[in-house]
Image (cartoon, rainbow, N blue to C red):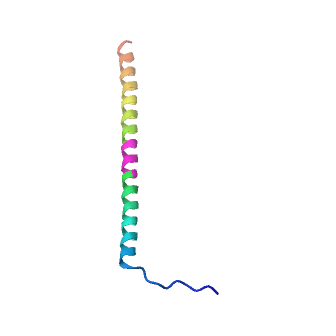
Amino acid sequence: MQARDTSVATPAAAESQRQSANARYELEIALLRQRITQLESAVEAERQRRQAVVDRYERLLEQR
């Protein structure tokens, strides 16, 4: 039978773990914000592309 480690983490170790977790969360948030920016740019580019198609179609209709 294996003995379980019942030692209590030192305050310094607990603080280090908390800081490490916070750093991971901050990194994840930064990556998500970057992805949001990329997606917003893609949406805007698609909106502009679609508007160009509509504008071209309207010009073609005017020429009829």
Give residue 31's position: percent from left, percent from top: 40, 51
- Image quadrant of residue 28? bottom left
In this figure, what is the number of numbered marks? 0
- The correct choice, above or below, for 20 with respect to 11 in the image is above
Judged by its main secondary structure, the magenta piece is helix
Q: Nearer the viewer, residue 29 or 60?
A: 29
Where residue 37 appears, as percent x and y from the top left, is 36, 44
Residue extent of the magenta highlight: 31-39
Please give the name of the residue rendered at 40% of the width and 47% of the height, measured from the top-left corner: 35
Residue at point 36%, 17% (across, down): 59
Which quadrant is home to the N terminus? bottom right
Instruction: Provide residue 11's location: percent of width, then percent of height.
Output: 36, 78
The quarter of the displayed image where residue 15 is located: bottom left
In the displayed structure, 38 sits above or below 5; it is above
In the depicted view, which residue is nearer to us: 47 or 41? 41
4 vs 30, left or right, is: right
Q: Nearer the viewer, residue 15 or 32?
A: 15
Magenta stretch containing residue 1, yes or no? Answer: no
Say whether residue 32 is magenta. Answer: yes
Residue at image point 35% right, 23% down: 55
Query: Residue 60 placed where, x, y %?
Result: 39, 16
Say which quadrant the C terminus sits in. top left
